[in-house]
Image (cartoon, grey):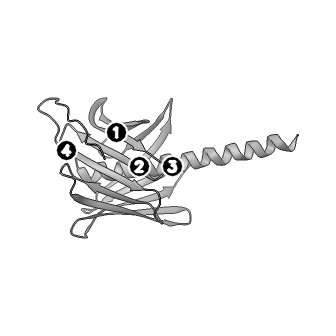
Amino acid sequence: MKRTQKFTIKGGLIMILYIDQNHNTLGKVFNIRDEDKKNKYYAKVNRIPFASKIKIINSTNNTVATIQKRIIALFPKYVITLHDNKEYTISLEFNFSPKFFVSTVNWVVDYNSPNINISVLKNSIANVKINSTEKYSHYVLETKVDISEVLAVATIIAVDLIIAEENKKGEKAMKKNEREFFKFY
C-alpha cells in the first residue's frame, strides 16, 4: 500500500489513520492502523435483521465504541456510543451529494467520492481519501485539529455502511426497472 504524503497546514497534521476494509470476509471487518502502520483498532459488523451493530475494539481487546443502526424514518440513522457512554447520531441528507450530520459535535460530513471531508461551521477538520477495489476499501484519515480519533473512525465506518446500503437500494431499483421494461418487449 502506498504511503500518503503529509501536507503542512498550521504546523502540520495531528493524526493520520489508515482504515482498511476487506470485502471478502464474512461480515465486514475494518482494520485501523496508525501512522507507523501499527494496529490500533479493528471493527466488525454484526448483521441482524433490520439492524447492524458494529464494535470498535482497541489493541488491548477492549470495546471503545459501538455503532448501532436504527431505522427511524425514510433514511436510517446510526448511533455511535463511545466507551464513556456519550452518544452521537449520524443522519443522512441528499442535496447534490450525500451529506451526513453528526449530532453533539456538529460535524458535517461531505461525501464526494473519492474524498470525504469533515467540517464544523464550514471549517475543515479532517479529510479522508478513499481508494477502493473489488477486494478492499482503503481510507486515509488526516486531521489538522485535535479530534476524538475513535469518533472519527466510527463516523467513517458508519458513512461507509450508509453509502453501501444506498448503493444496494439503487441497484435493486435499477434491476426492478429493467424487469418492468422488458415485460413490454
Does residue 73 appear to the left or right of 12 in the view shown? right
Q: Which of marks 3 and 1 is nearer the N terminus?
A: 1
**Quadrant of the image occupied by residue 61:** bottom left
Contact check, label 1 and label 4, Cβ < 8 Å: no
Residue type for callout 1: Lys
**Quadrant of the image occupied by residue 68:** bottom left
Q: Which of marks 1 and 2 is nearer the N terminus?
A: 1
Residue type for callout 3: Ala
Let me know if residue 51 appears in the view.
yes
Secondary structure at badge 4 equals strand
Does residue 83 appear to the left or right of 14 in the view shown? right
Residue type for callout 2: Ser
Determine the CA span between mark 1 and mark 4: 14 Å
Question: Which residue is under mark 3?
Answer: 164
Question: Which residue is under mark 2?
Answer: 137
Secondary structure at badge 2 equals strand
Q: Which of marks 1 and 4 is nearer the N terminus?
A: 4
The mark lying in front, picked from 1 and 4, is 1
Question: Which residue is under mark 4?
Answer: 15
Secondary structure at badge 3 equals helix
